[in-house]
Image (tube, rainbow, N blue to C red):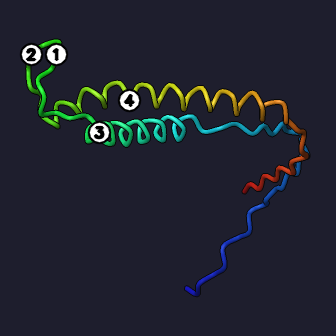
Amino acid sequence: MADQPAPERPSFSRDEIETASVRRAPKYGVFLAAGAFVGILVALILTFAIDSTDVSPYTQVVYSQLQVFGFTALICVVAGVTVAAIVALIFERVLGGRTRQVIVDHEQHGV
């Protein structure tokens, strides 16, 4: 038996033109991660700016630099994420009004 070519199956093609709305919006995850990163950097800077060799006037305890970093990181990361979220919301409000309509050519091929 010789190899015979497979019979061709009928195929169809459908072409649709639609209108879609395109709106620019910030990526919130990127903003929040950047805010957390900036918060950690600020906490690191404040850790070295705070003198940890003195006794705390409130608790009468000497805190290590790692403890000081942990305390300031808790506050600075929350503050950084909050500020970044507010900036992202402001960007969305400013850029959100720029919704535009585009024409999309949707092709569908089937067998």
Residue assigned mark 4: 76
Residue assigned mark 3: 49
Label 2 crowd bin: few (<14), some (14–19), many (20+), radius 10 Å: few
Residue 4 position in % (x across, y down): 64, 81
The amino acid type, in three-letter code, at marker 3 is: Ala
Label 3 crowd bin: few (<14), some (14–19), many (20+), radius 10 Å: few
Residue 22 position in % (x across, y down): 81, 40
Q: Residue furthest bottom?
A: 2
Q: CA distance from mark 4 to mark 1?
A: 22 Å
Q: Is residue 47 above or below residue 71?
A: below
Q: Earlier in the sequence, mark 2 or mark 3?
A: 3
Which of discs 4 and 3 lies nearer the camera? The answer is 3
Q: Earlier in the sequence, mark 4 or mark 3?
A: 3
Are the residues at dot 2 and dot 4 in contact (C-beta closer than 8 Å)? no
Relative side of 69 to 98, left or right: left
Residue at screen point 69% across, 28% down: 90
Residue 32 position in % (x across, y down): 49, 34
Q: Earlier in the sequence, mark 3 or mark 1?
A: 3
Q: CA distance from mark 2 to mark 4?
A: 24 Å
Q: Nearer the viewer, residue 93 or 8?
A: 93
Are the residues at dot 2 and dot 1 in contact (C-beta closer than 8 Å)? yes
The amino acid type, in three-letter code, at marker 2 is: Gln
- Label 2 SS: loop
Which of discs 4 and 1 lies nearer the camera? The answer is 1
Q: Nearer the viewer, residue 37 or 11?
A: 37
Q: CA distance from mark 3 to mark 1?
A: 17 Å
The amino acid type, in three-letter code, at marker 4 is: Cys
Relative side of 90 to 1, left or right: right
Residue assigned mark 1: 57
Q: Quadrant of residue 49?
A: top left
